[in-house]
Amino acid sequence: MQLATQRLLIRDWQPDIDAAEAIAIYGNPQVTQWIGDKSLDNTVEAVQARLQRYCDRAATFPGLGCWAVVQQDTQAIIGTLLLMPLPGQDNQPSGKVEIGWHFRPESWGYGYATEAAYAVLKMGFTTLDLPTIYAVALLENDRSLRVMQRLNMADLGVSHDYYGGHPLRLFCRHRFEVPIQAPI
Ligand SMILES: CC(C)(COP(=O)(O)OP(=O)(O)OC[C@H]1O[C@@H](n2cnc3c(N)ncnc32)[C@H](O)[C@@H]1OP(=O)(O)O)[C@@H](O)C(=O)NCCC(=O)NCCS
């Protein structure tokens, strides 16, 4: 998978090659405090194992994935964009698909997450023909909630139905709503 946007390239992770750079994402508590079990990966080996887990989980669902986001002008890996099965209350796939984003803090505040997520949403609706794409965030994760709003996702309120029943703010976007337009 490879998607190009104005400033970014979204491509498959190569866990063994990319792990050293991805420490800037998964070795930073400013990022990991908002993700899953909040575990921090301080070594290349730990990041490589995390990226491999993400890729393996997505690989069992055709078309879904977890991708590296590369800044075109510097070729730096600045984040992750993912389209994955959304885990339900029992942590098993709920039948819904979620979009997600993890970016290194030095690349926050430039619109990169929204730009990459817009391209992946569009690919999900067109290439994969998904009817609806969901997103969840911890209630106090204002930056992530703002990305969902910038993508014109609908706010469905607080839900306890996903990620093992943890209270999360749930958003969604349907394929046949208004035509999808670039937010930036
Ligand atoms: C969530 C996260 C991806 C958001 O990153 P972000 O850079 O704030 O989001 P965007 O890419 O949409 O950038 C928007 C910001 O860039 C600014 N910006 C600057 N240039 C811009 C441009 N050309 N286009 C759009 N926005 C631009 C916007 O004004 C906005 O700033 P503001 O939020 O201060 O108003 C990032 O904070 C992150 O990785 N957090 C940790 C992991 C995480 O929480 N993941 C989600 C779990 S649910």
Image: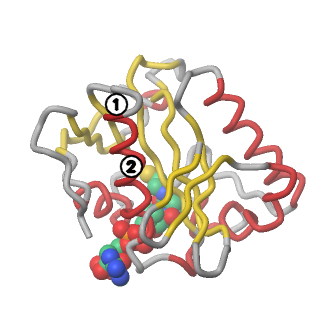
Q: How crowded is mark 2: few (under 14 residues within 10 Å), some or many (20 or more)?
A: many
- Position in image of residue 14 (x %, y %): 78, 49
Disc 1 and disc 2: Cα gap in Å?
Answer: 12 Å
Placement of 118 over or under 105, stated as above or below? above
Dot 1 alpha-carbon crowd within 10 angstroms: few under 14, some 14 to 19, many 20 or more: some
Q: Where is residue 83 in the image (x, y as percent from the top left)?
A: 48, 38
Residue at image point 50% right, 19% down: 93
Up/down of 3 relative to 160, above or below: below
* Picture quarter with the C terminus: bottom left
Q: Say the numbered circle drawn on residue 160.
A: 1
Q: Position of residue 27 (x, y in %)?
A: 73, 65
Q: In which quarter of the image is ligand 1?
A: bottom left
Q: Which residue is drawn at 44% across and 22% down?
A: 89
Residue matched to label 2: 137
At numbered mark 1, what does the secondary structure look like: helix, strand or loop? loop
Colouring: secondary structure
